[in-house]
Image: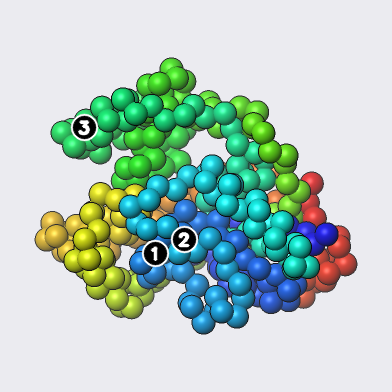
Amino acid sequence: MRPLIAILGPTAAGKTGFGVRLATELDGEIINADALQVYRGLEIGTDKPPFELRRTVPHHLIDILDPDEPYSAGEFVRRARPLIDEIRARGRAPILVGGSGLYLRALLEGLSPIPASDPEIRVELEERCSSEGLASLYQELLEVDPDTARRLAPGDRQRVLRALEVKASSGRPLSFWIRQKPLGSDRLDAAKLGLTVSRSILYDRIARRVQDMVKRGWVAEVEAMLQGGIDPGVPAFQAIGYRQIVRFVRGDWSLQEAVEDTIRATRRYAKRQMTWFRKERDVQWIRASDLERGFPSLVQQFKSGGAVAR
């Protein structure tokens, strides 16, 4: 059976390129483990692999949802597990690529017993968000569930409200439930490869990538979606960068303010990602600067069947 490979690390570390190279060498197919590349229309701001590349190397779980549809770790697991079996049945290697630590953990370790949604509490939180503002509710989350709050972006409306909903309905914070013994599905063995980049280099990459996205037409992308009837409050538009560009398009901020805030928010997100991934077990960490030199031996490890972790 072909090994399951998971490529993880912070945003802008080079996971996409690494995954494509590995898939090419190992006759593999990529399963997207990013929470935003699932949305149609969000091309530039999610830094999706180019269409030409997706035709060369099969990619899965990209462009599967409309921007107003919610996505969760549970939904990711429901879709990803059969894909792994299908890819292996074709004699190919399934390669997970993405920066969502919670999604990867849910898939590999199993889902935690997080309480189901409570419609009444959710409606109340939605109303409070409209009247008080998301910033106020995020501050509340910092008080009742600081671990989850630090993991989330302050502007991630969908997940901030969900975390408060869990606390209100169960009496326990979301972080408590995530730590519980997973339910149901068996754990999956995977070779976990983590990319690391020095903080100064990573922060510079983030700044240059955001600026490049703007040059490539990020503003026009957001404008077209808004003009097409997409509500600024949909789940997809809560993503870092999109909510800032929306504020520019609506005249609340200058473009410079939107870009600078996006860079700051992305850097904070990268820091949260690394905090999460450092707690993962059995990760083979690779410095991005050493990847070129060590890539041939890494490929040989997998071809000889000796690189599966755990």
- Depicted 242 relative to depicted 234: above or below: below
Q: Label 3's element?
A: helix
Rendered residue at 83%/66% (across/down): 301
Mark 2–mark 1 CB contact (< 8 Å): yes
Mark 1–mark 3 CB contact (< 8 Å): no
- Amino acid type shown at disc 3: Glu
- Amino acid type shown at disc 2: Ile
Rendered residue at 60%/56% (across/down): 8
Per the image, the residue denoted by label 1 is 40
Determine the CA span between mark 2 and mark 1: 7 Å
- Amino acid type shown at disc 1: Arg
Q: Position of residue 181 (x, y in %)?
A: 65, 28
- Depicted 173 relative to depicted 306: above or below: above
Residue 78 in the figure: left or right of residue 123: right
Instruction: Name the quadrant containing residue 153.
Output: top left
| For marks 2 and 3 on the same chain, the one whose residue lies earlier in the sequence | 2
Q: Quadrant of the N terminus?
A: bottom right
Mark 2–mark 3 CB contact (< 8 Å): no
Q: Within 10 angstroms of label 3, few (less than 14), some, or many (20 or more) residues?
A: few
Counting every numbered tag in the picture gives 3
Q: Label 2's element?
A: loop
Q: Position of residue 26 (x, y in %)?
A: 75, 72
Per the image, the residue denoted by label 2 is 64
Mark 2 vs mark 3, foreground winner is: 2
Q: Residue furthest top?
A: 171
Q: Within 10 angstroms of label 1, few (less than 14), some, or many (20 or more) residues?
A: some
Per the image, the residue denoted by label 3 is 127
Q: Label 1's element?
A: loop
**In terms of depth relative to the viewer, which is nearer, 235 or 301?**
235
Q: Position of residue 107 (x, y in %)?
A: 63, 46
Q: Is residue 294 visible?
A: no
Query: How is the structure coloured here?
Result: rainbow
